[in-house]
Image (cartoon, grey):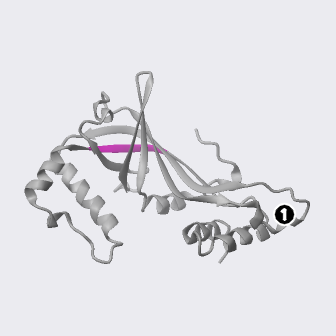
Amino acid sequence: MMYIPKHFATKDDRQIEEFLKDIGACDLITVSGDSLLISTLPMLHVPSPSKQGWGTLQGHLARQNPHVRVEGGGVSVVIVRGVSGYVSPGWYPSKLDGGKVVPTWDYVVAHIYGRLTIKDDPLWTRDLVDRLTNHHEARMETPWSIDEAPADFITAQLRAIVGVELEIDRVEAKFKLSQNRARGDVLGVIDALSGIDDDLALEIRRANDFN
């Protein structure tokens, strides 16, 4: 279970849903006997069609990955990370008031728990690869399509991977974005990050309701 102080708890489920729309590479962790299997892989969040529950996370692994051979899939957790960055105490105006400030790290993270299913089905995997590719290529000036590669090459590549699907039981999310600091300190962090890490600065602004 993740430690989440009240300052950094999510406002509502919609905040988590927005975060999960554009996740990238995640860490999949599964208990196997007396050890842990850990794999990093790109995944997509697929909301529940009925709007009940959290839906699934879908991705793919190399066929030779030991994760694929976990009997019955297994209970797993996926760690999804968002923006993150170092926060210098030098950015806080309050440092002038006695100097009682220390460095910290701001970040967004979610731990997603559920049961893992292996999808050794080339049609399922091809559809997943299409959706993953199209999702990330959408931001490119000239999006690339799998159909641009030779069909026999893609077929061979698909033989080397299998799909995985995590049916989500629960989500624990933490948005640690300077919400525990005074307004002046938060504005100092935003100002310092602007032009260096605009994505993190924007998330800190949103988390603190600065319009």
Q: Please, what is the dominant secondary structure of the magenta stretch? A: strand
- Residue topped by disc 1: 95
Decide: is 39 above or below 135.
above
Q: Residues within 10 Å of mark 1 (few under 14, many from 20)?
A: some
Asked if residue 120 shows in the view, the reply is yes
Nearest the viewer among 38 and 114 is 38
Tell me, yes or no, whether the highlighted magenta stretch contains residue 50.
Answer: no
Q: Which residues are magenta?
A: 163-170
Number of marks present in the image shown: 1
Residue drawn at x 42%, y 62% is 22
The C terminus: image quadrant: bottom right
* Above or below, comparing residue 83 to residue 173 in the picture: below
Between 53 and 178, the one lying in front of the other is: 178
**At 13% across and 49% down in the image, what residue appears?**
156
Left or right of 101? Residue 176 is: left
The residue sitting at 20% across, 40% down in the picture is 120
How far from the left and from the top, in percent, is residue 55?
38, 51
Provide the secondary structure element on which disc 1 rests.
helix
On the picture, is 56 further left or further right than 130?
A: right
Is 168 part of what is drawn in magenta? yes
Q: Is residue 19 left or right of residue 125?
A: right
Residue ID at (21%, 56%): 127
